[in-house]
Amino acid sequence: MKEKISQLFDYGDGIAVPGQAPAFDPGEIKELTMQMIHGEHAAPKRVRAVRCASRTLLIAAILASLFSVTALAAGLSIHQRRQAELRERKQIDAHQVTDYVEFDAAEDAAGVTLLSTINDGAEQVVYLNLSPVEADEVYDPGMLRMLDPQEARRYYLLEVEGTEGYGMLEYTPTDWDFPPEEMETVTLESGYVLEQPTPEAMHRKLMASCYDEQSKTLTLKGYVPADRLTQGEAVRLHVVLMEMGNGPDDDRRLIRDFGTVELTSTQQTVKTVRFDTPLLFRNEETGETGEVLGVELSYESVSWLVRYDSMMELCTRPADDATEEEKQAHARLVQSWLQAQDTLVQNAKLNFADGSSMNAPGLLGSSYADGEEKLIGGLGERTLDLNAVVSVTVCGETIPIP
């Protein structure tokens, strides 16, 4: 493992704004994890500390009480109950999500059990159960407090066998609203001020929605990068609980090995609409103009296809012998385009057949191909009803979706 998991919590010097305290976003960990998995030579990723937009989880908080009695009475396993909750929460049936795949999970087997998966374009998203997990092992591993950087922390990690690096599994609580008295302000080493739930409040939420005390089962979510999967071929996923420090590579300790499980990648349904005439957006800092060429809609994401003159400069890092001034100039260019892209998406909307609309989801990352950049916005625990989208509004123009 070339990089420490603890590196995921470094927001970067000179990027975060001291004194600013955005609401805690559990989706943040996905982006940081992907940076570690894809390695240091991946295309530049956006850092959400500079973003004004925030994402919220829209979920049904009553599901736990609904299934705790009726599902048990029906004799369902904890795995089947979690599958039912996920299907309802993500509106799989209501939105006719054909890409969502559930696995046979009738038995309450120990170890790792795959519940379901869906391809969001950038990753194969997996939901899984781990058991046995003790109640005191249900905790946030440090992305909330980020206190002593030398303090060892424990992480639930997912690895694709035969590849390097781990990804951190994340919780998917059904209720992420905290009253003011359960929030605290923490100042990071970089000087960045973060507003977040207290560890006690966080633990209570996780216990209520992600943990089953009777079976000692914990439900988590993970991501397998698309470049580690070949369509139709199976890979082995290995899940462990590991204690990590900030020391050398051997400064880690395996707490529990939950074993492996087999996963085969699935198809992604994508509706692509190319605009007849490119729409223009502006980088206010550099004065450059970019073009929006079209939009891609899937059940899990909304992506914008764009192009601008300095696009390829963002894909490369300054040369090793570049001066500090050249490196700073490149960093400013990257940040200016990330801000321009965020502004573009913040002002975009999806319009539905019933007359309603929703803001376009915030950006999680991007990819480059054939001289274009795809700006990928993730829907989190929601899904999109592809048949209900009739148009998109971007750059002040409304474009029909056939």
Image: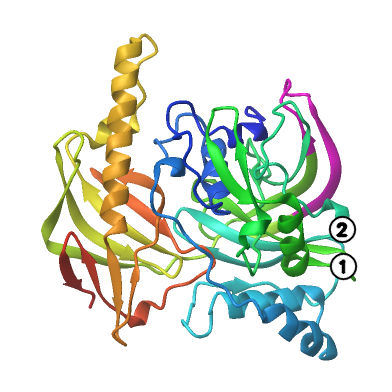
**What is the quadrant of the C terminus in the image?**
bottom left
Image position of 329 with respect to 272: above or below: above
Report how far apart the C-alphas of labels 2 and 1 lie in the structure.
Answer: 7 Å
Q: Quadrant of residue 118?
A: bottom right
Image position of 355 with respect to 216: above or below: below
Residue bounds of the magenta highlight: 243-260
**Residue lying farthest to the left in this orientation:** 277
Q: Residue at x 59, y 33 (%)?
A: 188
> Does residue 293 appear to the left or right of 9 in the view shown?
left
Q: Which is nearer the N-term, disc 2 or disc 1?
A: 2
Amino acid tagged 1: Glu
* Secondary structure mostly seen in the magenta stretch: strand
Residue that label 1 marks: 213
Q: Are marks 2 and 1 in contact (CB under 8 Å)?
A: yes
- Which sits in the foreground, 337 or 165? 337
Q: Residue at x 48, y 77 (%)?
A: 97
- Which sits in the foreground, 381 or 225? 381
Residue that label 2 marks: 135
Question: Is residue 256 shown in magenta?
Answer: yes
**What is the quadrant of the N terminus in the image?**
top right
Indicate the position of residue 72 as horizontal and vertical percent values: 83, 85
Mark 2 residue crowding within 10 angstroms, few (<14) / some (14–19) / many (20+): some
Amino acid tagged 2: Ala
